Amino acid sequence: MSSNKHQQLKLHQSFIFNPKHYRLFALGLFAFLCAYVVASTLTPVRESDASTVHITNNTSDFFIDITSADSLPLTVTAKPTGQLAYKADTINVTTNSDNGYKLYVSTSGNDNNIYQNGDPSTSSQGYFGPTAGTIASPTPLAQNTWGFALSKVTDTSDAKYNPIASTFADISAYVNNTEAPTTDSTWAKVPTFAHSDEAKISEFATSNYPAGNSFDIYYGINASTTLPTGDYSTVITYTAISEGVNVFPTMQDFTAEQCYNMAENTSINLSDARDDKYYRVTKMADGHCWMTDNLALDGTDKSGNVRVLTPSDSNVTTNRPLAANITDGTASEYDVVQIYSGVANDVTDSCNLTANPYCIVNTSTKYGNLYNWNAATAGVGKQATTGTITESVCPKGWQLPDRNGIYSYPNLLLHYGLPTSNTNSPSATQASQQAPLYFALTGYYVDSYYTPSAKSSAYYHTRTANSTTDTKIYGFTFSAIHGTFFPQGPDSVKRVGYSVRCVFSGQATDPTMQDFTTTMCSNLAVNSSKVLIDRRNNQFYRVVHAVDGNCWMADNLSIYGQDISATDSDFTTPSTYTIPASITATTDWNTNNYQTKKVEVAHGLGSSATSDSSYYGEVFYNWTVAVAKETTAGVTSAPNTSICPAGWQLPVNGPETTNKSWARLLSSTYGYGITTGTALLENQYLGFTKYYGNWHWLSASEGGQGSYGVFWSGTPSSETNAYYLTYFSGGVTLQDVNNKGYGWSIRCVQR
């Protein structure tokens, strides 16, 4: 496109702010409303074709409405120096809540760019990015950016008065009722959905306005001729909540990409669509999103009927009924569903340090309900004597933690430098009660009673049965009396009521590594990425469409201690392959083990790792495991198999002209032109953010965390050696050869 000609940049029926509305009520100031919402509106309303949401309560007639335009078609004639266009959406919020409301604006996903036809794969052709301005500091729109502004009405008697707008900006060029926007007008960016709290556009401390609060929100763009002619679109979400609550999507609608994109140790509030209760969810250092409040789902619904868990809202494969909550005086049983709610709203607001010397005051975490194991496993775990129960009382997309592995308490704890085996550790007991873990001293319900003295210990269910008896399971427990710490406690009792925390493991609608096609890869703009799930263990990985034309994993492979199948993995025979569990003692891998399978999960034994938890949790594989073989004795040619997901493979050895090779990816001719470790780390597209280290069988230890990283190829050089990539502060070394018995990391490239 010539830059000296005017071009029509048509945004008709395309720069469409299709508003979605969310009704999510607080449990504190607004709890009375949550408790009485009728069954037809139990789950938060997602969207409405009429751009109207009405939540009502037939018993008490509490309601909140949001109305706005169905769409905002907008047409602009672009100019080389930019051309401003804008349009107003009139929002009306009606509620009779004495506590008022807050209203937020955001995009409907985790991307606030505006693409042609709303398709991110067109990003290489150009797009509208968000303005750098904020409500606190709005700015004029730069070329090819967009933002919002509010009607600046200062008269409180005016129907369109908005208290937020009066503080938005105090300059004459600002959007108001009498002056249209100009190129000098100031605008704020519309945040992504996960950060919707950054753009509060209206707030009333007291409402009771049956006629409604009405105000205008302007959306503006500045279009230059550097963008191609076309239709550009996005979807806007308005979120209304009661006073004092930060609101986000439901747990059932939370996605792998939203979890992946959260910053480590940050928290959001999610509501459980089954009863509208709210829970803090934190992105932990293990890379997963965990509840940091205890589950408080009751056995009956708001009408008093026994609650039935369904696959659409819970972690079950078919409908599973619960049972009415038990009360004090009920005998504990292991073969029926028992839920005790007597301490659901308690918190640790004081500590008797004489009786519980390792207690930490924690007023942030509610105790939640106490569940026997049959209730925690949705009524299907009572007879299990071994293995894991895949169903649970957790919301859809969430699960009970495993005994070990990537979704386990030990794996979570090791990322914070806490013990991963049973020990006496007062410091660990205290650390677990504090940020970001917030495990509460909930005690337990057993044999007809729950007493305050029980609030000296914490007991949490896993989904793993104890193999020695049908009455025992594995759990996570610690004591504020003795400072004992049992992340793999084998003696939790099925009939006793313990707490439940759930960890996010992905929704069925999340895209998978195995279903990601080469066409999907090519449709991604170069250097664009997507979060995919490995359906073998529900681990999340970011994949990037790299400069070399291939899609590469931008995270290291993390799977161990399980059987994988030829259906979901990068081999055809045999039908299953067992990836070993992590070694438990250094003597288990202190010799050259290239002929047998070996896996080790880093526990931060390296000197660098002990001071930085972000090095923890790496999975190191010897070459035999990497290529999915039982032994590689006598193997001198590439087997062309691996433990990568189906449709993905290990990189191959070869010069830069060889496709799927490390050399091609990093070359200046075909790839990123990376020759030093520093450049590799600074390339955020490929995700090499740390030096991962390795397992060194000669020293029988982990090492090198913070110093270097090493990655297998699928190409051997002899029976005992294979090619690999290594990088360190001084550079990147390709086509190195070393012993197959070392434990190194794995990155996969799409076949």
Image (cartoon, grey):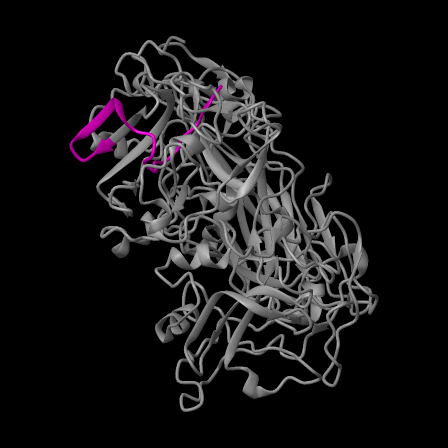
- Queried whether the magenta region covers residue 259, the answer comes back as no
Q: Residue at x 74, y 61 (%)?
A: 383
Q: Tell me residue 690's x, y (percent).
A: 29, 41
Q: Residue at x 18, y 35 (%)?
A: 729
Residue 417 vs 237, above or below: the answer is: below
Extreme residue toward the bottom, this view: 354
Q: Residue at x 45, y 54 (%)?
A: 411
Residues 303 and 410: in front is 410
Magenta extent: 727-751
Where's the N terminus, which quadrant? top left
Residue 679 vs 343, above or below: the answer is: above
Extreme residue toward the front, this view: 634
Q: Residue at x 57, y 47 (%)?
A: 505
Q: Tell me residue 232's x, y (percent).
A: 54, 25
Q: Tell me residue 12's x, y (percent).
A: 59, 23
Report whether residue 111 is seen: yes
Residues 364 and 610: in front is 610
- Queried whether the magenta region covers residue 729, the answer comes back as yes
In this rendering, position of residue 540 left or right of residue 418: right
